[in-house]
Image: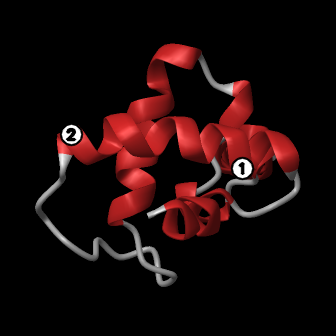
Amino acid sequence: MKKYFIIGLIAASVTSLSAMAADKKEDHKPLAKWTCEEFLAIDDSFYPTAVGFGELLTKKDKVEDTVLDVDGIQTLTPLVLEACKKDAKANFVEQVKKAK
């Protein structure tokens, strides 16, 4: 009888842990799948960082170039902001690529 109780307890623990892991995965969306609305929801001070990472990504979520043009990000960020404010449902990374 104790054996079945322990097995049931272990099964319940594993189930609850997998449910918690599934919840965590839903909280973090890959940058390549962000909409402009999600980009605009982050803190203003992180806009240049997000634009920089967006510039590095390809459509396959791979880093396209390992060299990041910091000066270019400063000029690119306002353009991406303007484009995202016009179309909040657009893909963020596509807006970064268009603004280049």
Q: Is the residue 4 above or below the residue 42 in the image?
A: below
Q: Residue at the left extreme?
A: 67
Q: Is the residue 45 above or below the residue 50 in the image?
A: above
- Label 2 residue SS: helix
In the rendered view, does 11 fall on the left or right side of 53?
right
x and y, in percent, of residue 60 in the image: 47, 84
x and y, in percent, of residue 36 in the image: 74, 48
The count of marks equals: 2
How many residues crowd around disc 1 within 10 Å: few (fewer than 14), some, or many (20 or more)?
some
Q: Does the residue at mark 2 contact the one at mark 1 (Cβ under 8 Å)? A: no
According to the image, label 2 marks what residue? 71
Q: CA distance from mark 2 to mark 1?
A: 20 Å
Near-viewer residue (94 or 21): 94
Q: Residue at the bottom extreme?
A: 60
- Label 1 residue SS: helix
Tell me which residue sits at (59%, 16%) in the image. 43
x and y, in percent, of residue 63 in the image: 29, 71
How many residues crowd around disc 2 within 10 Å: few (fewer than 14), some, or many (20 or more)?
few
According to the image, label 1 marks what residue? 83
The amino acid pointed to by label 1 is Ala
Tell me which residue sits at (39%, 60%) in the image. 55
The amino acid pointed to by label 2 is Asp
Near-viewer residue (60 or 74): 74
Near-viewer residue (22 or 42): 42
x and y, in percent, of residue 42 in the image: 64, 25
Tell me which residue sits at (64%, 38%) in the image. 81
Tell me which residue sits at (50%, 30%) in the image. 47
